[in-house]
Amino acid sequence: MEGLESSSVILTGDRPTGPLHLGHFVGSLQNRVRLQHQCQQYIMIADMQALTDYFDRPKHVVQNVAEVVKDYIAVGIDPEKTTIFIQSQIPELCELTMLLLNLVTTARLQRYPTIKNEIQLRAFGESIPAGFLCYPVSQAADITLFRATHVPAGEDQAPMIEQTNELVRRFHYTYQTDCLREVELLLSKTPRLIGIDGNAKASKSLGNAIFLSDSEKVVHDKVFSMYTDPEHIRASDPGKVEGNVVFAYLDAFYPDPEEVESWKASYRKGGLGDMVLKTRLNDTLQALLKPIREKRATIQQAEALEIACAGSQKMRSIAQATMEEVRQAVGIVYR
C-alpha cells in the first residue's frame, strides 16, 4: 500500500467475541494478507477488551481465541510473516494503560465519539462501567507499546488515532521524553458489509452475518434468506437495487463488476428474478469459502493456541523493552 516502507510496523486485531465473518474478510483480513508481504505486521486478539462486554462470560471469550486464530490461518495469514498474539498475555499493557490513564480526564473519554454513541445505545445512564469508558486508553497502550507506525482502519476510527497521539504528546510533555511513537491511520476504503437482514452492518452480536466457518448448507440458507426488494414480487417487476442486500454482496464478492452492473440494469427495468441473483451469489460465496473452510478444518484447537502463545512470547520482549524506557522516563526505577 502507498506510504508504507519495509520498516513500517502495522498493528491490527480483533476482539474474540465469536468467529469471524465475511464483513471481516472484505474489511480487514484480505488487507492483512497483502500487508504481511510488505512490512512487519502484528495482529492482537483483544481478549481483555472483549471482557468489557463479556466480563460475566469469560469462557466465551477464551474459547473464541482459538477460533479467531483458525480463521486467520485459513484465509492466508502466515504466522511466519505475521505475529499473532493474545492481549492478556502481555502484562506490560496493563502497566502502560495505568500510566496513560493519569493523563486523560473522564470528560475527555466521554466525548470520544464511539464511546459517546455506545453509551447512548446501551442506555448506561450514570452507570457507565469504568472498563468500558477507558477502552480508548487501552487501545492507545496497545498501539504505543509495540511501537506501531500505522493502524489500518476506517474513517470512523480516526478519533481513536487522534486520542492515541494526544496521549503520546501529553506523555512526552509531562515527562520530557520522546520514548513513545505517534501513529498514522492507514485508511481502509472498503465500505462496511451490510448484514444479511439489511438492517445494519454484518455483526457477530446481531447474528446477521455469514461466518467463514459456516457450512455449505448454512451459507446457502443465509443467502436465500437475504433481504432484497419486498415489492419485487415477480421477475418481470421493476426492482430496487439500493438497499438490496444481494447486490451489496455481489458488489463485494463477484469477480466481474461489469456483469454485476448489467444485472442491476436488468433488475431495475424488470426481467431478472431474485432467485437467479441469489443462486449466482451463492455459487460465488461457496467458491470463495470452500478452500477457507477446508483449510480451517485441518487446524486443531491446540495448534491454534500454540501459535498465539508463541506470538505472545515474542511480543513480550518488545513490550518489556518499551516499558523499560517508559519507566526510566517516568522515574519509577528503584534499582
Image: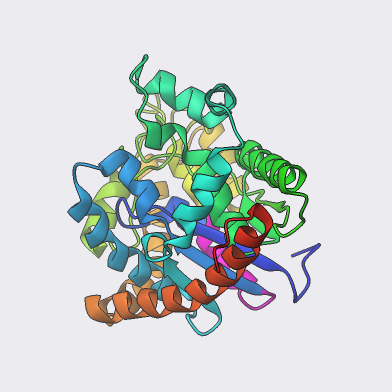
Residue 33 position (above or below residue 333): below
Question: Residue 316 location, x and y as percent?
Answer: 48, 72
Q: Would you say 155 lies left or right of 82 here? A: right
Q: Would you say 255 lies left or right of 211 here? A: right
Q: How many marks?
A: 0
Question: Residue 23 location, x and y as percent?
Answer: 45, 50
Residue sitting at x 57%, y 44%: 100
Residue sitting at x 24%, y 50%: 221
Question: Residue 40 location, x and y as percent?
Answer: 64, 74
Residue 205 highlighted magenta (yes or no): no
Residue 28 highlighted magenta (yes or no): yes
Q: Give the quadrant of residue 45.
A: bottom left
Residue sitting at x 44%, y 27%: 118
Q: What residue occupies the far top of the structure in this picture?
A: 125
Q: Would you say 59 lies left or right of 307 here? A: left
User: In the image, which residues are magenta?
Assistant: 27-39
- Main SS, magenta region, reads helix
User: Foreground: 94 or 202?
Assistant: 94
Q: Is residue 157 visible?
A: yes
Judging from the image, the colouring scheme is: rainbow
User: Foreground: 267 or 135?
Assistant: 135
Residue 222 position (above or below residue 5): above
User: Foreground: 105 or 61?
Assistant: 105
